[in-house]
Image (cartoon, rainbow, N blue to C red):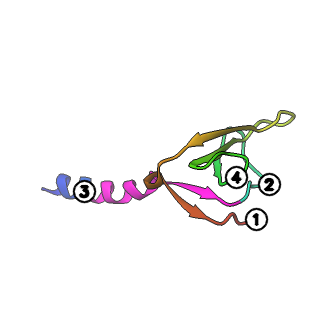
Amino acid sequence: MRVLMLALVFSAIALPCLAQTVLKSEPLLLAPYEVALVQDAACPHGKVLKVTGAIRGLHRRKVCVALAAEQASLAVATP
């Protein structure tokens, strides 16, 4: 019984963590291989800009990707 209750508690905590936050502006600092989703006018309607951080000396990778509404929440980037 304890194992079942523990599994339910962990699943309740883990499910909200699966959502990815969509930022309104691209972050200035991004760790290598870290991914940020940005709401950008360069991407068509229904898509967001996926920015992947790069190691020093290389450019960030930017790609427009489709994102379901239930997968993301809109937030404001904090400097």
Q: CA distance from mark 1 to mark 4?
A: 18 Å
> For this rendering, which residue is in front, 26 or 5?
26
Q: Position of residue 2 (x, y in %)?
A: 17, 57
Q: Disc 1 residue type?
A: Pro
Kindly indicate whether the residue at mark 1 contacts the one at mark 2 (C-beta within 8 angstroms).
yes
Rendered image: mark on residue 8? 3
Q: Secondary structure at mark 4?
A: loop
Task: Please give left or right for residue 43 compared with residue 9 in the image.
Answer: right
The CA distance from mark 3 to mark 2 is 38 Å
Return the residue nearer the eye: 61 or 48: 48
Horizontal and vertical percent for residue 30? 73, 48
Q: Residues within 10 Å of mark 4 (few under 14, many from 20)?
A: some
- Give the SS element for disc 2: loop
Please provide the residue range marked out in magenta.
8-24
Q: Are marks 4 and 3 in contact (CB under 8 Å)?
A: no
Decide which of tag 1 and tag 3 comes sooner along the chain: 3
CA distance for labels 1 and 3: 36 Å
User: CB under 8 Å between callouts 2 and 4?
Assistant: no
Residue type of the residue flagged with mark 3: Leu
Which residue bears the numbered disc 1? 79
Instruction: Determine the residue located farthest toward the left in the rendered image.
Output: 1
- Front of the two marks 1 and 4: 4
How far apart in space, not on screen, are marks 2 and 1 (Cα)? 8 Å
Q: Earlier in the sequence, mark 4 or mark 3?
A: 3
Q: Secondary structure at mark 3?
A: helix
Q: Which residue is mark 4?
A: 40
Image coordinates for residue 3, horizontal then vertical, percent: 19, 52
Lower sequence index among marks 1 and 4: 4
Residue with the mark numbered 2 = 28
Which residue, as the protein is rendered here, is positioned at the far top? 58
